[in-house]
Amino acid sequence: MSHDDVYDSAPWTAHYAAAHREPDAGLVKANSLPDMLTQAGQQYADHIAFTTCMPNGMSGRLSYAEVEEMSDAFAVYLREGLKLEPGARVAVQMPNCLTLPVVAFGILKAGCVLVNVNPLYTRPEMEHQFNDSGAEVLVIVNLFADKLEDILPRTPIRKVVLTHVAQWFPPVVKGVLHLVLKYWNRAIPRHSMEATGIDAALAEGRRLRDNGNIRVQDYWQGLTRDDTAVLQYTGGTTGVSKGSVLTHGNLLANLEQVDTLAGRHISPGQECILTALPMYHIFAFTVNLLAFYYSGAHNVLVPSPRPIQNCQRAFDNFPISWISGVNTLYNALLNEEWFTVYPPRHMKVALAGGTALHKAVAERWQRLVGCPISEGYGLTETSPVVCFNLIGDERPDSIGIPAPNTQVRLVDDEGATVPLGEPGEMIVKGPQVMQGYWNRPGDTEQSLKDGWFYTGDVAVMESDGHFRIVDRKKDMVLVSGFNVYPNEVEDCIARIPQVQESAVIGVPDEQSGEAVKAFVVLREEGITAEDIIRHCRNELAAYKVPKQVEFRDDLPKTPVGKVLRKELREPAPKTDA
């Protein structure tokens, strides 16, 4: 059997039967996202859809019926009030809050294209994304209005809609939170730009809808799975952020794939999922926002999980049965006394992605919480899910098996398929793969070849079709000709009890070309760089052992929790070593 035949035989399909669903059993009977959203809104009309839970426990909520009515009104506001054409780009820049699903769903219902924007972006990053996407309208939380005011004249944005984190909370609670944020925390900046409040926008949408006898369905009735739904920008961890063109079909296909592999574990209308990851990120956008809305779940939104104590009241006040997160989030929870003394009692499954899940973290979670962390793998460009561990059959150090109707191969630098068990770059073909990068034909041509998306991640396939991510191709360290993958070294260091987290990079070395350097954050004192090196020497081959150890108070991360290794590679003031 040739190397190509090994992958063409798709050995992973033998595991699909364990999910107790046929590969196409979870098909979403909808031609577009608004079609799917409306079905769910009507089916679960009297259920609570979203609750925003603040760090002090104050909260506000919306039912499915309210989300449907408000998103309809926003769609009319965009099309009739602002005269947007179908396909116009509308940017949304806010943390997790009640406004986000309302405006996101309204944009899709209007037949427009949603542009998710990181609210923590700097002014130059905002300006780049607004100009690159060609966004005409922006809905932004008032906490960041001052950044916008400076750059607005240099962007195509012609209308700004303002909201705030406590939008649609009970009046007294909303008033208290507004006073705290504005006068105590001084978090709401002054600005003088012209903007419309979200309540005024919805009121205008309702007026136009009622006076014009408008059927909102007409805006999206003609949409197909081939139409663009979202411009989802990459995290920019390895370069300039690019807009991935995701169609309604890309996202619906991924919902179907997730439902096929995990759907039987989700009780329709009964689940409560904690959303601590930001919904402007593709992981939480597809899984938490779209998939669990389709399932009628109650979605508890945490505006920011940093510090991790911000999640405590959500766990205290709601019967959380699902959570999605990254390794750093789970690790942080396991280091909190309030979490370890009173672990959640209703948890069914924790979902992990974004970065490699450390084995030590997964094992501690299982022992404490009593439920598994099911690790998957995906990218912005794949909507995002590519691989997934079957729930109940989780494999340590594995990202699981490819989603149904997904082809995966591992190739070398020349594009040739590597032998079974050998590391190679993962390339992916399937209905969830993006159409390309927005206005970037050169980048598209480099990443998409004959329908295969080149992920830049190095993986290994086992004989039964399970995959294991080794590391990012660009993060690999070359020591005397030997490949060292940072994830392996970081996982080794994570097993030291005094270590909270670590990150590994390559640094220039006269003898070996590159050497391994570890940045370590301690949870308690009493351990030295020599102790860490000694531990690694006992667990790893000599060339993988860190030659340098630098202690840090924290590590640079993206808002999702991915460690920014590229920032660690930049020169920094020298500390303990």
Image (cartoon, grey):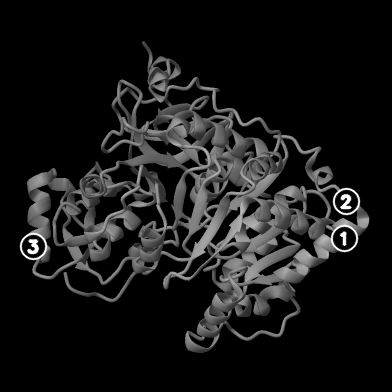
**Mark drawn on residue 530:** 3
Could you tell me the amino acid type at mark 2?
Ile
Could you tell me the amino acid type at mark 3?
Glu
> Which residue carries the number 1 mark?
208
With respect to residue 34, does 281 lie above or below? below
**Residue found at x 17% / y 73%:** 576
With respect to residue 219, does 498 lie above or below? below
Q: Earlier in the sequence, mark 2 or mark 1?
A: 1
Q: Quadrant of the C terminus?
A: bottom left
Name the side, left or right, on which 351 lies relative to 106: left
| Element type at mark 3 | helix
The answer to whether the residues at label 2 and label 1 have Cβ atoms under 8 Å apart is: yes
**Mark drawn on residue 214:** 2
Q: Residue furthest right?
A: 212
**Residue found at x 45% / y 66%:** 304
**Residue found at x 49% / y 34%:** 258
Q: Earlier in the sequence, mark 1 or mark 3?
A: 1
Viewer-proximal residue among 263 and 556:
263
Viewer-proximal residue among 39 and 242:
39
| Element type at mark 2 | loop
